[in-house]
Image: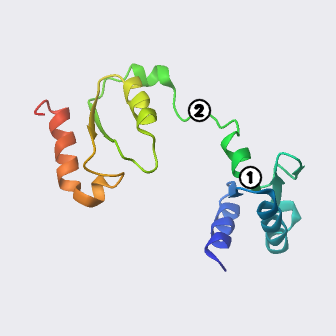
Amino acid sequence: MTPDQLKFNKALAEGRFAFYTAPIKALVSEKFFALVEIFGAENVGMMTGDSSVNSDAPIICCTAEILANHPWPRLYDADVLRRNEVPVAATIYINDLYVERTFAQETAETIGGLKAWVTDEFEHNGLRADGERVLGTLLDMVRGRA
């Protein structure tokens, strides 16, 4: 079994959803038919913008645009975050490969009392690159020493 197939198997076993995305419809369609062969038509759906097949299935093959525009549930309640009273610090990486700095800063500004360390010393890898320094800096910020 391929790593993708293992991921889909795990999602099915845990009652979760799994997605396969590709930038073009032809690749989505190709993967859809391959996954139907493996997991059965009842477990695989496809959404491309032009068509939708079994869109409630636990495994969905779709174009990246469809997935990006999906109406996802909110990750957090902004009002609850604004009322935060727990000391908290976070690292915002200027050159983060995965999270746009503006998004990270907007979220940080939502959290009451959050102290942000904005740095270009790391690229989303601060804990792996120098965890002791990153955690030490964050703890110092929370304790008022930085």
Q: Which mark is residue 130?
A: none
Foreground label between 1 and 2 = 1
Q: Is residue 69 something one can see in this rendering?
A: yes
Residue drawn at x 88%, y 64% as measured from the top left: 41
Q: Which mark is residue 74?
A: 2
From the viewer's perspective, is residue 114 above or below residue 118? above
- Quick one: SS at disc 2? loop
Q: Is residue 60 something one can see in this rendering?
A: no
* Comes first in the chain, label 1 or label 2: 1
Give how far apart the Cα atoms at labels 1 and 2 are.
Answer: 22 Å
| Front in this rendered view, residue 86 or 101 | 101
Residue at mark 1 = 63
Q: Please tell me in which quadrant of the rendered image residue 115 appears.
A: top left
Q: Please tell me in which quadrant of the rendered image residue 109 appears.
A: top left
Farthest residue, direction bottom: 1
Residue drawn at x 67%, y 80% as measured from the top left: 1
Q: Is residue 80 left or right of residue 15?
A: left
Q: Amino acid at mark 2?
A: Arg
From the viewer's perspective, is residue 64 above or below residue 86? below
Residue 134 percent across, percent down from the top left: 22, 48
